[in-house]
Image (tube, helix red, strand yellow):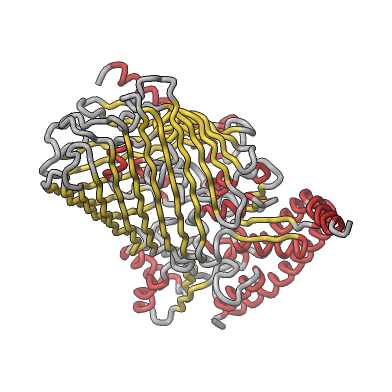
Amino acid sequence: MKTIYPLFTLLILIAAPGYSKLSVITTTTDLRNLVEEVGKENVSVEAIAKGTQDPHFIEAKPSFMVKASRADLVISVGMDLEIGWLPSIIQGARNPSIQHGKKGFLEVGLLVEPLEVPKGAVSRAEGDVHPFGNPHVTLDPIRAGEIAGKIAERLGELDPPHLVQYATHAKAFQTLMASRTKEWKQRVAKSGVKSAVTYHKTLTYFLDRFEIQNPAILEPKPGIPPTSSHILDVIRLIREKNISLVLVENFFDPTVTDKIKNDIPALRSKTVAVSVDGRPGVRTLGELYESLIQVIEGKE
Amino acid sequence: MTPVTKIKIFAVFALILAAQESQAIAHHNAAPGSQAANPVIGANFLGLYLRGPKLPQDSKQVPHNGFSLQESEFSFSSDVDPYFKASAVFSVAQENGQSEFSISPEEVYFETLSLPWVNLRVGKFKAAFGKQNSLHTHAYPFIDSPLINQQLFGAEGLNEVGASAAVLIPASWFIEIIAQTFTTRNEALFNSPNSGDLGGLLHLKNLWDLNDDITFEAGLSGVLGTNSADQTASVCGADLTLKWRPASGGKYKAVSFTTEFLYGKRKEIKDSDSGLSAEKITGLASWLQYQFAERWWAQGRVEKAYGISQFPGSANDFKVSTLLGFFPSEFSGLRMQYDFHNLASNTTDHTLGLQYIISIGAHPAHAY
């Protein structure tokens, strides 16, 4: 009889879904942090891309398929950001619950207002253009808050007993981001920085939120590495528009700015994290936005 | 080119252009509708320039000295319904010994979407044998496939009509078992006289993440079926792959090392020229791929093959290849390859190859 009790307890634990956490896989570390903020102790979450990797180009390692095979929910940005690798992972996972159209699959990018949606026909002659708009939506704290709300809704559908908790946590995150955005805007205004050059159009949503112009990109076209003639054009533009700051996303080669700094010694050029875990000390979206604001202020 | 071939090629192009147009409209408007259900369509165009003293000058031979249109691949894929996905790759390539091009279905199959842990596939597909055989031409690590693969499976690889089950085993690492049964039409390995004969294949694939930067893969494969002598033909193989791509800075550097061993036994098969036994063939190919800049790769391959059928029982084939690849974007590539080939007849050969690879439309991710 004594041997039956532990077995009975084990069976109950296995059979009772309420005792197990929701298993969530996200494509990026930013989305992972949003799930952490919303799901807290009721979810376990892992990201596929590292914060130091370019999310456009992730290799579809079979180990990701193993993780996705056990997931209750896969959350991606969509907007073709992960088009080159996520479909292979989803198919290789052999998990019917996370297929497109199922509750276990959520694309969040198009649930918020997109920027840079191309007008007219899309051609690869223009580089790696995203037909649905710029996919780096989580770089805007307000849109990140909206996405947290969408994640809360889906977590609530999959785990109804904690629906209210998820909604409450999402609301708290939105409120925090709204209040911090006001503070960050004041600090950006005080810094006097009105425009910045970036390597790729990764920071579009962040710069748009904080009303910083982005008149030049180091890539001649999205996804095409900088050329000497294009760098000369950028230098000319920096001089014309009196731009004082170049931001290089952490997965790109920062040495491309050496020529620009030689020509314009007063220019500040910084390599910045553009994802959670993009560098030590950036473990949340709040810390990510704060680190970017500090770079703009010249404190880093 | 015969009128029938012309009509076939025209029909394929018309279908592709019509679907591409509607697909572009669907993408542009980003609106769900009837066009959103169109298949995803892509095409790869491969061209070659070869120069080698032993290559034929006759442009009807494949391969031959000079320029050639190596292959064009047209791919279509789409979810059929909530249960199945269908994929097709049609290849347009020159027939050996002719100046004409022909269309052949390289892969045409449907597979399950809604089964847990297992993927079932029915149709024509590349057999899941080792690393090289399941690749399409545009994804080959080198311009050509290893000698032993060419000898055992033919120039186009082992590619048959049948059914496949790929099971993901629940474990802490990636472990997959693939069981396949298919026709035995492959001319190099089987060429079975009976259309009802079925071959069988088993493939075991393991992959471990040693850390965030390094993966190690080990695979075992075995295939058997009936050959032209109505006897058993079998091949077994083993493959190992070590890949390094750092999580930080991985856009600019990566290394991959693969080694693949194949052992083939084809009962009562004789060499067509010499009449000597060509039953047993063994070969090993090892290659290193080094990405040294965002768009540049340097590669090397060493091969050894025993019992290549042209010269059975004599010395071994030994081949060394080096390759330099430049990829302006993920949709275009230029590769230059030099081969030194010490043939089993104790003569040597040198070949220089230049290749372009162009992709338009959708381009599904290559297998890791």
Measured as percent of width and height from the top left, residue A69 is found at 63, 49
* Left or right: A261, with B147 as reference point: right
Residue B68: quarter of image: top left
Q: Position of residue A274 (x, y in %)?
A: 55, 67
In the foreground, B275 or A198: B275
| Residue appearing at x 46%, y 78% in the figure | A268
Whether residue B103 can be seen here: no
Residue sitting farthest toward the front: A1
Q: How many marks?
A: 0
For the point 18% across and 30% down, the residue is: B275
Residue B343 x %, y %: 16, 46
Residue B242 visible in the shown view = yes
Above or below, comparing residue A65 to residue B190 in the picture: below
For this rendering, which residue is in front, B172 or A216? B172
Is B109 on the left or on the right of A276, as rendered?
Answer: left
| In the displayed structure image, the side of residue A29 where residue A259 appears, left or right | left
Instruction: Determine the residue positioned at 43% across, 56% down.
Output: A223
Viewer-closest of A280 and B280: B280
Image quadrant where residue A266 sits: bottom left
Indicate the position of residue A45 as horizontal and vertical percent values.
67, 60
Question: Observer-nearest residue: B244 or A287?
Answer: B244
Q: Which corner quadrant of the image does residue A188 belong to? A: bottom right
Residue at the image point whose x is 40% and y is 68% from the top? A237
Viewport quadrant of the N terminus of chain B: top left
Outermost residue toward the right? A1
Position of residue A17 relative to residue A255, above or below, is above
Left or right, B309 with reference to A228: left
